[in-house]
Image (cartoon, helix red, strand yellow):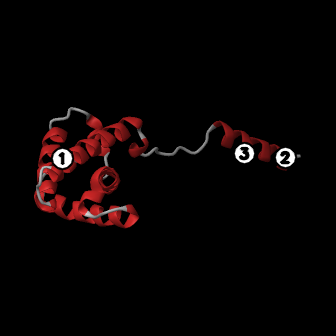
Amino acid sequence: MLRLFFCFVFFVVVLLHPLSSFASHTSDPTVSLLQNRISKNFSKKFCNAIKNGLSKDEAMTSALIKTENIASFSYNPQKKWIEKEDLANQISIKVINDCGWSFGLMGKEGIDYFKSYFLEIYDKTTPDKKLSS
């Protein structure tokens, strides 16, 4: 009987006071919306630069600087929660889908290549600034 009582108390305590967990900020819809807006903006600037005859390096640098200027003046406090890797992945997918064929990149291999290329140029172009913070 005593054992049954302790089991009952234990289950009541567990059910009424569950373990707390911390939600990830990146699952916040406003973070996703801001990240989506940044990736759309970058893709549009990059693809337009490619269409206007700039080299891939010139288009990348130009799009990074223009997108950085827009993001740095954003008053959205959620920008600090954007992960650079996630943003780079989303940008890569958007660029490859929008205009990757024009410079020979398609599919998963194209996305992976563009992501590593983006991160390399990003670190060289904006060493002190962070697009996502």
For marks 2 and 1, the one nearer the N-term is: 2
Please, what is the three-letter code of the amino acid marked with disc 2? Answer: Leu
Percent coordinates x, y for residue 58 in the rendering: 10, 57
Mark 3 surroundings within 10 Å by alpha-carbon count, few (fewer than 14), some (14 through 19), many (20 or more)? few
Instruction: Determine the secondary structure under disc 3.
Output: helix
Disc assigned to residue 10: 3
- CA distance separating discs 1 and 3: 63 Å
Q: Assign a secondary structure to mark 1.
A: helix
Name the residue type under label 1: Asn
Give me the residue at 61% from left, 42% from top.
18
In front: label 2 or label 1: 1
Q: Is any atom of residue 51 visible in this view?
A: yes
Query: Dot 2: what SS?
Result: helix
**Quarter of the image holding residue 8?**
top right
Q: Is residue 79 left or right of residue 45?
A: right
Q: Which residue is mark 1?
A: 48
Tell which of 97 and 119 is nearer to you: 97
Task: Kindly identify which residue carries mark 2.
Answer: 4
